[in-house]
Image: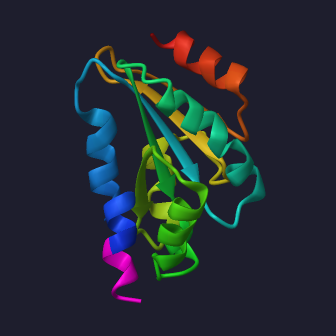
Amino acid sequence: MLILLPLISASQPAKIVKMKDLQSLFATKSDSIQVINFWATWCGPCVKELPVFEKLNNEGATNVKVTLVSLDLDLDPNPEKVYKFIVRKNLKSSVLILDEQDPNSWIDKIDPKWSGAIPATLIVNTKTGQRTFFEGEVDEQKLNNLISAIQ
């Protein structure tokens, strides 16, 4: 198992982060639109919408950065399932694994309207400070509309 971890992280690193690290991601000013999707391997609608984010990431738009934030550690402290999922699904987007045990302590920091249900997507224009939040599954058109609304 220890041998697999370096191989998996070499092909697609998934960094384990705390809320403060995540907040700095969407607070740092840049020319990029930050698309941050909250998901988990056990969430059917989350897994179903991942190809939409992968397509956006793979289109190579220089002004859009996709980050997939796994919430799996809330239920299972072992990140191995997430690492294996990333490899199995061949995810190319940046993946972070949020290591926070009490969702009620950080959900409002993402968006005050968020009930905590996933999937959920936060889109931030860090240059202008505009942001939009959507709770629920997105398709390609919905995602593009959300991005366009804050460009």
- Residue 124 at what x, y percent from top left? 42, 27
Q: Which portion, as a residue range, is magenta?
A: 1-6
Q: Residue at x 62, y 54 (%)?
A: 116
> Relative to the observer, which residue lies in front, 74 or 114?
74
Identify whether 57 is placed above or below 107: above
> Relative to the observer, which residue lies in front, 64 or 6?
6
- Residue 140 at what x, y percent from top left? 69, 25
**Displayed quadrant of residue 106:** bottom left
- Residue 147 at what x, y percent from top left? 53, 18
Res 54 seen here: yes
Residue 44 belongs to magenta span: no
Q: Residue at x 64, y 34 (%)?
A: 52
- Residue 132 at what x, y percent from top left? 53, 25
On the rendered structure, is 41 left or right of 151?
A: right
On the rendered structure, is 143 left or right of 70?
A: right
Identify whether 111 is placed above or below 76: above
Pick the quarter of the image with the N terminus.
bottom left
Q: Residue at x 42, y 62 (%)?
A: 98
On the rendered structure, is 143 left or right of 26?
A: right
Identify whether 10 is placed above or below 117: below
Question: Which of the colour schemes (rainbow, by chain, secondary structure, one colour) is used?
Answer: rainbow
